[in-house]
Image (cartoon, grey):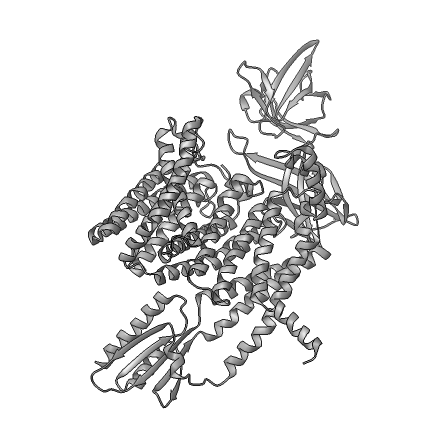
Amino acid sequence: MSKFEKLNEKVWDFFSSVDLAVSLFIVISIGAAVGTIIPQQPEPEITVRFFSKIMSEENAIKIYEVINLLDLNNLYHSWWFTFLLFMFALNLIVCSLDRLPVLIKSFKSQPQPLPISIIEKMPIKREIKFNEKSDFKNKVIDLLKKKGFQTDIFHTSEALQIQAKKWIKTRLAIYVTHLSILIILAGALIGTFWGFRGHMNIVEGTGTDFAISDDGKAIPLGFKVFCDRFEVDYYENSAVPKAYRSYLRIIENENPVKFNGKETVLIEVNHPLSYKGITFYQASYGFQPQENAEFRFTYFDKNGKPVPLKAKFEEKFKLPGQTVSVSVIDFSPALGIDEQGRLFNMTTDMINPAVLLLFEDKGKRENQWILKKIPETWETPYGRIRFDELWGAQYTGIQVRKDPGVPLIYAGSILMCIGLFVSLFLRPINYFVTIKNNTICFYAPSSKGKVMTEKKLEEIISELKGEVS
Amino acid sequence: MSYQIISIAGLFYILAMPIYIIYMLSKNNKVGYLASTTLLLGASIHIYGFVRRFLEMYAINHSVMRSIPITNLYESLVFFVLSLVIGYLFIEWKYRKKSFGVFISIIAGIGIGLTELLGMAREVQPLVPALKSNWLLAHVTLSFIAYAAFAISFITALLHIIVSSENKKSFKYYFSTALLGVMLFVFISMIIDIITAGNPKSVKMFHSTLGNSSLSIAILSWLSLLGFIFISYKFSDKLVKILKDFRIDDNFLEDITYKGIAFGFPIFTIGGLVFGAIWADQAWGRYWGWDPKETWSLITWFVYAFYLHAKFIRGWQANKTSMIAVVGFIVTLFTYLGVNLFLSGLHSYGSM
């Protein structure tokens, strides 16, 4: 063997070893765990602040230098972590190439009788003796076949040997699992090269044609996304949001895109929208009033007929059939009353929106709070005014993603589940039976699940006893 | 209220512990039946409480799929304990052995006790939008069933190490007895915490012991923790003798350890990792994002993968593999509780 071949073999053995696999499990685990402790953010201040909690600032800065050198603040995308994952994949490939052909060959090869000395060393052994003579051989074989075993019979000089096996091919399942991991890793790789992730905040009534990636770059989408409307429902008497949703419209080359015949699509948490491989997820929302934000009211005239009204901030408007002019002079997204009875604003979430209306009628000035959720406040000296909404003051936070690797991830996941279930729930079973005169011995070569194997052998034996007597 | 019923179930679990101990010492079958019946009764009350809570949630959410009570830390702990006890009762019935019931009752008792101690919100809460998905049921229930399977394998693995370590100077003897001592201390400390707390809502863990505001009591508690470890170290060989007298064989323990992992690992893979990834893909727009919970799930997965490879390919046996199973559950515990208590991330529904 030449030196090169020797080296080649050494390298192959290294990559096909379980020791490498097991070491990688440990190293990757430790690395990943470190990443959950050190903040995964590129800004140096965050890391320094984190470490200066437990040490002096000077040392924290030194630590930051080390962290930056090893990419520990971007650990999961660092060169060494990627390298470890690459080694993991390589190990899986070489391992499978090394072992799979041997396994397949073993399925094809003719079974051979084992020398009795090997059989007797097996960890599980049950022996029964019968007094009367009987056709033990066929009874044992019939019983094993009834239980789904495949049998091979050998007449050796020492004894009659029966090899019974069941679910032998499930040994292949573990390679399905290994393959599935490779498929998932491939899917992830495709996602990093040909996909992107970003977010965009669209204020109600506006649109945008780009997303901002996680590292702050603008990604053009090739079409424009409009948010016509954004709504949040809160649980009653609570600041906990129950549901939030955006009504989106996509305009491509000046033409609206239709989804199931409709231009407007509703997205919610857990219900995203996909277009041209790009998916839009409802992620967050916030308060960001715009110049053109519009207060919308419904005025009920003397006959109770509803009339829609709208106005911008501090813009005067008339109530139909009245001389009074009205304007919005204050707004609170979450109006509350403190212990002294003073009004205050709780948060910027629109939990309890309220407007302060100023009524000016023939030199008389009056103002009144109108709360959207409390109908008693809608009654004014000039009639019933319902505050419907402030439109154009909230933005919807949308997570944008394109990932062509996802189908591979799904396929790999399904394969992984199948492989694991088959390989762990349908373990191959091997029994060896020797028959000599009136003595029948059952052997099992594996010590895994010893108690249950013994129990199952016990069952077979008691059935056999029943048949013989 | 449902949580009061579940607390009663917890009392039954704690009650089952001394009965199991008496059974182990006396080997009286009648006591054994009484122990199992107590545990079964606890489980029945637990299931009743669980159903009651389901109905309470259904009254708010009006959706069967989204009313399974597994939406916050309290509910998940309750579900974990229920899976653990039912799993144990199944093994007891299948193998006709009651040998590790006492440890199950300790963990079940600690589990329910923790819900009281940590001052968790136990009232039924409305669902936040992120949890409004049918994946909730599949992802969370399967994850916790897997955790329960790992917990069972942890107990048998720990017992296995104790039973097979006669040499008091060996590492495995130190390891297992120290762990046992800590577990006992935590159990007793929790009982003291509950008794001494004036207001049941303000109970804090270790408040009456390790973290006591009085320095002397705190020091005393730390000393007694060491004492517990020492006692456990000193007398575990007696425990070994009892367990051996009891015909608890290491094959049985190794078998259950393996079965627990062989059952839990695929369930965890499909429920925890795969379903979790699919749900994250649909809700957050990425299937994997190295969120602390995700990362620690992966670490848990690696540890048990290590166990399976060590056992099947390397042919490691007995105590070596049991040691991995013990470490595996400690990592699982961190994935479950530690991540929510110490690290921040997207799985914040699980915090208190």
A175 sits left or right of A209 in the view = left
* Residue A65 sits in quarter: top right
* Residue B76 sits in quarter: top left
Position in image of residue A172 (x %, y %): 52, 72
Position in image of residue B335 (x %, y %): 51, 47
Q: Report the residue at 37% width, 41% height from top.
A: B228
A130 sits left or right of A366 in the view = left
Hey, which residue is sitting farthest top in the picture?
A363
A335 sits left or right of B171 in the view = right
Position in image of residue A102 (x %, y %): 55, 77
* Nearest to the observer: residue A466 or residue A252: A466
Hey, which residue is sitting farthest front in the picture?
B169
* Residue A206 sits in quarter: top right
Query: Which quarter of the figure is the N terminus of chain B placed in?
Result: top left
Query: Does A349 sit above or below residue B351?
Result: above
How many labels were placed on the picture?
A: 0
Hey, which residue is sitting farthest right in the picture?
A253
* Nearest to the observer: residue B222 or residue B302: B222
Query: Does A194 sit above or below residue A322?
Result: below
Asked whether residue B253 is in view, the answer is yes
Query: Does A151 sit above or below residue A367?
Result: below
Position in image of residue B204 (x %, y %): 43, 32
Asked whether residue A384 is in view, the answer is no
* Nearest to the observer: residue B180 or residue A311: B180
